[in-house]
Image (cartoon, grey):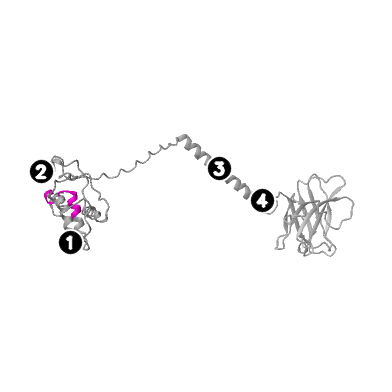
Amino acid sequence: MMQHLYEMPRPPILLNPTIPPALSEVILQSIAKNPAERFPTASAMTVALAQALNVPVPAGLSTSQSMNGELDYNPLQPPGLAPGSDLSAAHLQASLPSPLTQLSEDYIQTSIITPVHRTPAPVSTAIPREGISITPLSPVAPLAPPEKPRRKLSGAFVAVIVCIIILVGIAASTAALLALQHQAGATATPNPTAVVVGHVAFTNGRGTFDQVEIDLQNIPAPPAGKTYYAWLDIVSDSGESAMPHWQLCTVQGVVHCLYPGDAQHSNLLQKNDRFLITEENAGVSLDIPNPIARLYYAELSHNGVATFDVKKCPSSSATNASNPCR
């Protein structure tokens, strides 16, 4: 602040070398720190500028009148001072208005050089007092909106949610288990736990398994006009060869009989791989077992075993490929 009030300003010719020396002198005199060193009137300053710029003096202005006549009113002169009176620093400080924005050096250059281009120079309307510093206020950050209070879940509500999740998981697991069981039941061997109703045994009468002994229990009596037949067949056979078969008799739900074989004492176990019992019409000559009336069966093997379990045929269709009685 003190530098701005008392230090001599830099000559304009040093800031802009293109300014004529005469014009630089006029500018320095117009901004002199001591008011007595400035132009006494605006007319005098105008005449000096015209002479420095080598232009005609405006009409109505003369050098003698401007320099020697009564001093005009100077708008920059503080009130209470007569023209030509001295302006002390103490009087200047006492008569200064409220603090104003400090003029920068660049702003002074602009305000002084601007009249050369015939434009009015902007004049600041306030000068800050000595010893007073102005601290710019920091921008106030906008207040954040208040957070909405979060609803706390009650213990009962949480328990209900957990129970629902558990029930959904149990239902999904049960449905998946039932689907797997259904699929396994559809692809598994039919009737895997069929009840064994008896046995069929191949006996060696003449050095070969030429006889068949049958022992069955809990066999109901055949309906009227029907009778039971036992069959030995080859599953892969197309039915062209004759199948050994004979009639069975039941006594109070029990079947116990011996098939003596043929006259050639053929090996009945070696030639066949299945034993069947069917329900047929009585007194009818048969060549093949009735495909829709097969009741019991036994799967034969040729690994040295001669006795086999007799089981009830599955209830699935006889044409089903997985049905052992097909």
Q: Are the residues flagged by discs 4 and 1 in contact, CB closer than 8 Å?
A: no
Name the element at disc 1: helix
What residue is at 68 percent from the left and 52 percent from the top? 186
Q: Earlier in the sequence, mark 2 or mark 3?
A: 2
Q: Amino acid at mark 4?
A: Gly
Q: Amino acid at mark 1?
A: Pro
Name the residue beneath numbered marker 4: 185
The mark lying in front, picked from 1 and 2, is 1
Q: Camera-side residue: 228 or 17?
A: 17
The mark lying in front, picked from 2 and 3, is 2
Q: Earlier in the sequence, mark 4 or mark 3?
A: 3
Q: Are the residues flagged by discs 1 and 2 in contact, CB closer than 8 Å?
A: no
C-alpha separation, residue under disc 4 versus residue under disc 1: 117 Å
C-alpha separation, residue under disc 1 versus residue under disc 3: 99 Å
Q: Position of residue 165 (x, y in %)?
A: 52, 42
Name the residue beneath numbered marker 1: 21
Q: Residue furthest front?
A: 60
Q: Are the residues flagged by discs 2 and 4 in contact, CB closer than 8 Å?
A: no
The mark lying in front, picked from 4 and 3, is 3
Q: Amino acid at mark 2?
A: Ala
Name the element at disc 3: helix
Name the residue beneath numbered marker 3: 168
Label 2: how many Cα within 10 Å (few below 14, some 14–19, many 20+): few
What residue is at 50 percent from the left and 37 percent from the top? 160
Label 3: how many Cα within 10 Å (few below 14, some 14–19, many 20+): few
Name the residue beneath numbered marker 2: 90
Q: Which residues are magenta?
A: 35-47
